[in-house]
Each structure stands twice: as structure tokens, then as C-alpha cells.
Amino acid sequence: MSLLVFALVHLAPGDPISAIVPADAPQEVIDKLKEYYGFDKPLPVQYFRWLAVTLTGDLGTSIGTGRPVATEVASAFGNTIILAIAATLFAFSLAVFLGTSAAYAKSRIVDRLVTLISLMGVSVPHFWLAIVLVIIFSVEMGVLPPMGIGPENSAGWRFDWPHLKHMILPTIALSVIPLGVVTRPGR
């Protein structure tokens, strides 16, 4: 897997150095940075050097923020757990309700509707649904934020409306597949 990731990074157009230096940077600056980061070495040497450093837990420095990547990942981990719990609770609660409704309803229409929701849930990709939700509710209607975890000036995540509204679209997008999977046998 590490070899695949390394290869994909090197197959992508451009190089990491061009992302951190201005377009008009002198060639000697570019050469110094390539030497510093080891991009002047052959690819096998670069790979094993990268692998050795990564296995020690040093994931490098983020080009975007200048902070260690491990710190960036760790700070996002809590938000990921919160989002995963929210999507799981939403999916299972709605799935139990829909499955129970379909099982107890005497109406064939309710059963067909729940079956349709279940089928769509397992058929629609998360990423596509997320893009559609952002286009509809953020771009077109302007009622929900398209990204982020809360207000920019807040120190951390809190259980209040400014933070909860950032959770709505990703929670819906991530809950669709488990909703479809759990609803189907429940009916």
C-alpha cells in the first residue's frame, strides 16, 4: 500500500516543490529545496527514506499550514469521531423507524416506498450525494455551510446550533449507505 501511495504521488502532475515556491523563484532556491527534501535522489532511495521516516511516526510538515501533519491528523480525529457517531445514530434510528413502519403497515405503498429508500441508500455513493447536498443546501439555497466543523473563531466543537449546522450535510451523506443496509432486513 505504501508503494502504491508513493507511486501515485510521483505520478501526479507537478511536484511538491512547485507548491511551496513562487513561480518566479530562482533555480538555485528550487535546487536547494529539492536537495533538502531529498527529491534530487533516485526514486528507490526516496521511497525507502520516506518509508523509514514515516515508520518512526514522523509524517512531515503540512505545506498548507506549516504544522506537523501528525498534529493536523490528531486535531481532526476528534471531529471524525463526532461525525461518525452522529451518522451512525441517525442512520440506525431512521432505519429502525422505516423498517418497523414497513413491517407493520398494511399498505403496499409504504412497503414499496421503504424498499425504494433502502435500495437508493445502498446505490448512491457518499461522495456524489455530498456534492449534491452542498450544491442544493449551500450554493443554491444558502441555508447550510458547505464545509468546516464550526465557526472559525471557536476554540473547539460544542453542542450548539453554530456547530450543529456544520454537521447536517456530512451526517446525512455518511448515513445513507448504513440506512439502506439496515432498513432492508428490518422490513
Image (cartoon, rainbow, N blue to C red):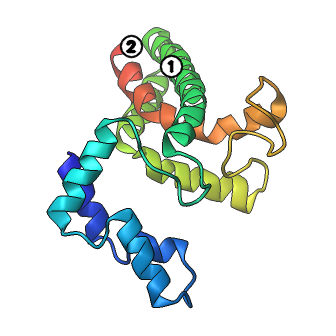
Q: Is residue 113 above or below residue 61?
A: above
Q: Quadrant of the C terminus?
A: top left
Q: Is residue 163 above or below residue 81?
A: below
| 114 or 65, nearer to the observer | 65
Using the numbered discs, state the Cα–Cα distance from disc 2 to disc 1 in whole angstroms. Answer: 8 Å
Q: Position of residue 179 (x, y in %)?
A: 45, 26
Residue 79 in sight from this viewpoint: yes
The residue depicted at 69 percent of the width and 39 percent of the height is: 149
The residue depicted at 73 percent of the width and 29 percent of the height is: 157
**Residues at discs 2 and 1 in contact (Cβ within 8 Å):** yes
Q: Is residue 45 left or right of residue 149?
A: left
Marks 2 and 1, the one that precedes in the sequence: 1
Q: Is residue 7 left or right of residue 32?
A: left
Query: Which SS class for mark 1?
Result: helix
Q: Is residue 140 left or right of residue 172?
A: right
Q: Amino acid at mark 1?
A: Leu
Give the residue at mark 2: 186
Give the residue at mark 1: 98
Q: Amino acid at mark 2?
A: Gly
Q: Position of residue 116 (x, y in %)?
A: 41, 35
